[in-house]
Amino acid sequence: MLDLAFIRENPDLIRDVARRRHAEFDLDALLATDAELRQVRRQAEDLRAEQNRLSKQIREAGGDREARERLIAAGRTVAGALKELEPRERALDATLHDLMLLVPNIPDASVPEGVGEEDNVEIKRVGEPRAFDFEPLDHVTLMRELGWLDLERAAKVAGSREYILKGEAVFLELALMQFALHRMSRKGFAPLSVPAMAKEFCFIGNSQFPRGREQTYALPDDDLFLIGTAEVAITGMHSGEILSERDLPIRYVAYSPCYRREAGTYGKDTKGIMRVHHFFKVEQYIICRADHEESVRWHEELLANSEELVVALELPYRVLNICTGDLGDAKVKGYDIECWIPTEGRYRETHSDSYFHDFQARRADLRYRDNEGTVRYVHTLNNTALSSARTIIALVENHQRHDGTIGVPEALRPYLGGRETIGRPWRA
RNA sequence: GGAGGGAUGGCAGAGCGGUUUAAUGCGGCGGUCUUGAAAACCGUUGACCGAAAGGUCCGGGGGUUCGAAUCCCUCUCCCUCCGCCA
């Protein structure tokens, strides 16, 4: 959420943001509602001031019965007028709030202009795609042959876009998560394991709602929703708080399942476990001072942390600077890391590194008291450390061996009993 | 699931219809003293809207009243006990 006063004073800039983002929202409706609310609120406040004056006079009238009766009658009139005005004030306030939630954040000047993902700008490429001396197999074939994946029974249990991992794939998944948690906690990030479901305010605070609500699983009987990322739970965790500057920055590394409805993606990535309804993720999250330079510094550092993990897993990757049209509403700027998928012959997204300035903090009412005693909204950032399904794809495809087994990168071996390969050889 | 108790400023904690414009303590900030710090002492200090006047806010929402932190209803969360359970 942006500062309302800022929107009021910079309507042209906000219109330009909408244009750059190719986003739709009704700024005129917002400004009109704001203007009307301010007018109605002023009337209501005048009435309340009158009410207070009368209340004081009634108190002071003491035993003077006649004056008392007269003042109470006047008070009744004011109360009646206020009662008529208040529903209007509340309704306008609610409308304004709803409209405010639809205003996107202001992209940084370094975000490339563009309409969709095709306009994202590659800023670096690291690692050479491996030259296979045999025909590499895709992750579905490999994992099936290794006895690691059952898609048919997963569909039977839970429908499309679900999967059952079996055998060593189960340990591989856990190994990746543990690897990421250990590495990040060694860097000073505090490990968290958070609830997989959260209340609505967490999703609004984080900006998943109201736009993108259809991407989230709802549990209506309990007024809860399944999180699509640990970010939701972490933002909710500190919402409404006033932290102290000396507690900042807060650095978390959170492990959680992630649930995504993938509504509207029919026909996209229908093979295997590239696009699935659940996976596990280790997420980096930072809460820092309200300082642009500091946000930028952490944004770069979060990227470097994730790159370090990907490099340790010996996966070729590239980094994209996400363009205005593909950038989530709440983000000031975003980088994606995409890992090389040999059988697709292209890079696929595995990480998303974002900063928000105080956009999430305003929605979640997350503030801090600075060293001068001033209360400010914090800045928030997050980036994937590792996510399970897509990293498994990249790992098995890139590290497959001629005999159908999977090579384990050295950094991951401590989490897999020291083994250099996993899976039984099944190819000649 | 059942019974009871509770939720007040950064934290702790009074207040239980109208001098509460929310006491007091801790913490924070500023100062005196000090080479510097600690201690002590002095001052200052809730959040939000508004240019201001003024207004809003005592877990959320609704109600009673001329007037609600205070009374009523409802929801959420926390605590204690019982039941069930990995």
Image: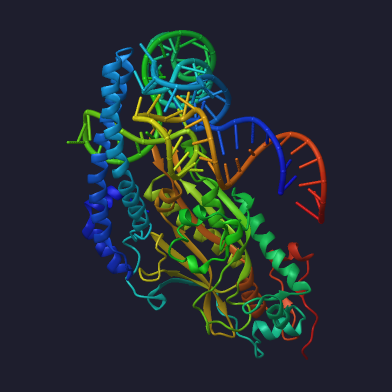
Q: How many marks?
A: 0
Q: Which quadrant, please, contains the C terminus of chain A?
A: bottom right
Front one among A102 and B31: A102
Q: Toward which corner of the image does residue A255 lie, by quadrant? A: bottom right
Front one among A43 and B40: A43
Where's residue A153, x and y in %? 73, 80
Q: Toward which corner of the image does residue B12 lie, by quadrant? A: top right
A62 up-or-down from A267: above or below: above
In the image, what residue occupies the spot 63% across and 72% down?
A: A389
Query: In the visual, does A47 lie left or right of A374?
Result: left
Front one among A107 and B15: B15
B53 up-or-down from A412: above or below: above
In the image, what residue occupies the spot 45% across and 65% down?
A: A335
Query: In the visual, does A39 lie left or right of A344?
Result: left
Front one among A291 and B36: A291
Query: In the visual, does A145 lie left or right of A63?
Result: right
